[in-house]
Amino acid sequence: MCVLCNVLASEHWAELEGGRRGRFMRVRLLNRVLAFYGLRLDDWSGRVWVLRDRKGRSAVVNDLGSLWVAAERLAGRPLDPLEPALVVAL
Amino acid sequence: MKIPVALVTGFLGSGKTTLVSRLLQHPDMGETAVIVNELGEVGIDHHLLRRVDERTVLMPSGCLCCALRGDLADELRDLKARRDAGEIPPFERVVVETTGLANPAPIVSTLLSEPLVTHHFRLEAVVTTVDAQHGLRHDESVGQAAAADRLVVTKSDLADPSAVIERLRRLNPGATLVEALFGDVEPAALFDGVREHDPRDLDYDESPEHAHEIRAFCVTFDEPLDWIAFGIWLTMLLQARGSDVLRVKGLLDVGADGPLVLNGVQHVVHPPEHLPEWPDEDRRSRLVFIARGIEREALERSLTAFCRAA
């Protein structure tokens, strides 16, 4: 599926496995990554995620595809996993 | 059974229509419906020919690259409905011929993610024509060649194809390459075994190519990869660098008996598929990237950091 335009797909390709435990582990790792950009993610009743920044702004996201789009908007810059400082921070 | 859809792409004048015309004459092609953007010289004979206007529906998130090709989805649904109603002869395969400037990613996205399309059709192969005379002079043609499962080098009567072939082998080592004069190629060479995941596709000599920033390289990992970390990492990478990652393809060890097959074109990733067993002795995770301006070492460091943090 398209990571950016996953609107029509029933489930995102990267979230097909793992069940509830997988969802928990996913949020935990995502928070380690997002903390680098001053963002935090909360699981909301196991159905959607709520992404927040330090200014109190938030966005509801459905999957990994829409998460990165929203995170880029809240952070005000691209979230590049190859950024050396992020790699060191992890 | 789902109807196979073959996507034929290639730059302007690279011989797409000639290839499609010749393929349609081959008895092994059976009854084939053809969808084209432009009315060309495709011999229609007993085949069906449909013309599709370039009509692109932008998805709400506004990613131009992955705009769903609404026109294509409409045509495929309409073809199926008319076939079922007996209004047109039954067909066993669909060939979609794109325009010379088309980016194949949105078309692949339509074929993989539009629910009404995926219910009845399956993407069989992406076939890209590259002419020996002009090669890969344009960004569009590089993207088309990177997306290919099969590369067809044309017009080798007009120019020595060796330089183009060498460039293509470096750019997309996972694609099978055939030469065809005037579209003369066996359909089996284009369509058989495309989804058989030959590990040799991921095994090649990496040669540096600095003249062009786009290059293919293979990343291997000895330890099993954490699938959750990998999914987070790749989706993040494709959001940040999607236009620079023309292709990603690989066999991943995620701790199961067999590998997970990964195949993506730009932002579009095929639903990953578990193989029951490894195709050869090598059980390391292997990922081939065709990318612009991305260093292999940076990818390795980053993915390793994500997996360790999981």
Image (tube, coloured by chain):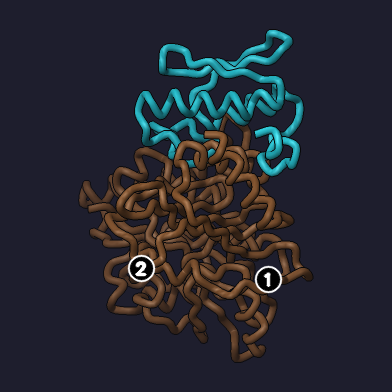
Chain colours: A cyan, B brown
Q: Residues within 10 Å of mark 1 (few under 14, many from 20)?
A: many
Residue A14: % across, % down: 46, 38
Q: Are marks 1 and 2 on the same chain?
A: yes
Vertical side of B211 occupied by A39: above or below:
above
Chain identifier of the residue bearing label 1 in the image = B
Q: Which residue is mark 1?
A: B136
Residue B25 percent coordinates (x, y): 35, 78
- Decide if residue A29 is in sight here: yes
Which residue is rendered at x = 42% and y = 82% of the image?
A: B185
Task: Name the foreground residue: B41 vs B203.
Answer: B203
Query: Relative to B186, does residue B124 appear above or below in the rendering?
Result: above
Q: Amino acid at mark 2?
A: Asp
Query: Residue at coordinates 50% horizontally, 83% vertically from top-left?
Result: B180
Q: Amino acid at mark 1?
A: Leu
Of residue B115 and residue B39, the one placed in the foreground of this image is B115
Query: Horizontally, is B308 left or right of B132 in the view?
Result: left
- Disc assigned to residue B280: 2
Callout 2: 10 Å neighbours few (<14), some, many (20+)? few
Q: Are marks 1 and 2 in contact (CB under 8 Å)?
A: no
First in sequence: mark 1 vs mark 2: 1
B261 relative position to B162: left or right: left
Q: Secondary structure at mark 2?
A: loop
**Helix, strand or loop for disc 1:** loop
Quarter of the view holding residue B157: bottom right
